[in-house]
């Protein structure tokens, strides 16, 4: 079980409507089923290596309405979406989906970690998350690998549009 079942202090600023808002959204429906057993935290590979992330605490803070603290914080971006917690939760809480819901709210309100905004910029501009560097080209040549062609931006654009991710990308690229 979770090794550090620490007490969660009531957040200083709470938004009582936050929990209802999350519950209404796709992925957030199971929020109030959580009874804080800690099985998710003890199954989580991220929580094992850092105390900056704990799914049980994230859920409790969401239930309490710590809106600002959650959406402007880094914790919700540390989940690696492995779904271990979902497999083991005795209450059927869709923890990973809940975290995606929180990320969507954060994105809509303009909170995004720099690393992701850089990825979005690179994807929109080059069709790749990582630009093809001269070093990369030379190394591929050395190992007899074929030359990397620039990605098809039209296809990327269509995917971004069909997922409405282009709206997020526009905001980030404008910054
Ligand atoms: S395992 Fe499920 S019920 Fe237990 S703390 Fe995590 S989300 Fe809540
Ligand atoms: S899905 Fe996220 S919260 Fe759940 S165990 Fe994996 S990393 Fe932890």
Image (tube, rainbow, N blue to C red):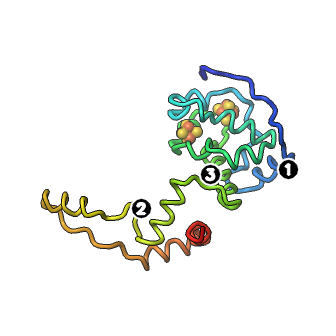
Closer to the camera, 35 or 123?
A: 123
Q: Is 138 placed above or below 83 here?
A: below
* Residue 86 seen anywhere in this rendered image of the structure: no
Residue on which the image places disc 3:
100
Residue 167: x and y in percent read 61, 71
Q: Quadrant of residue 145?
A: bottom left
Q: Is 124 placed above or below 143 here?
A: below
Q: Between marks 2 and 1, how big is the CA–CA gap?
A: 37 Å
The tag on residue 17 is 1
In the rendered structure, which disc, 2 or 3, sits on the residue that comes first in sequence?
A: 3
Closer to the camera, 34 or 159?
A: 159
In the rendered structure, which disc, 1 or 3, sits on the residue that comes first in sequence?
A: 1
Q: Is 130 placed above or below 63 here?
A: below
Q: Which of the two discs, 2 and 3, sits closer to the camera?
A: 2
Q: Which of the two discs, 2 and 1, sits closer to the camera?
A: 2
Q: Quadrant of the N terminus?
A: top right
Give neighbour class at mark 3: few <14, some 14-19, many 20+ (Cα, 10 Å): some
Q: Between marks 1 and 3, how big is the CA–CA gap?
A: 19 Å
**Helix, strand or loop at mark 2:** loop
């Amino acid at each position: 079980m979770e090794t550090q079942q620490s007490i969660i202090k009531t957040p200083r600023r709470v938004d009582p409507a936050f929990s209802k808002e999350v519950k209404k959204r796709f992925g957030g429906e199971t929020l109030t089923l959580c009874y804080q057993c800690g099985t998710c935290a003890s199954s989580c590979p991220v929580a094992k290596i850092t105390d900056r992330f704990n799914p049980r605490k994230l859920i409790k803070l969401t239930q309490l309405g710590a809106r600002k603290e959650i959406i402007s914080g880094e914790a919700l971006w540390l989940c690696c979406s492995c779904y271990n917690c979902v497999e083991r939760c005795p209450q059927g809480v869709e923890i990973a989906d809940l975290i995606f819901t929180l990320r969507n709210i954060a994105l809509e309100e303009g909170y995004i970690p720099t690393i992701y905004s850089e990825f979005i910029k690179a994807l929109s501009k080059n069709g790749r998350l990582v630009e093809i560097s001269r070093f990369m080209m030379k190394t591929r040549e050395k190992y007899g690998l074929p030359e990397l062609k620039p990605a098809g931006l039209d296809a990327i654009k269509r995917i971004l549009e069909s997922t409405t991710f282009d709206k997020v990308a526009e905001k980030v690229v404008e910054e």
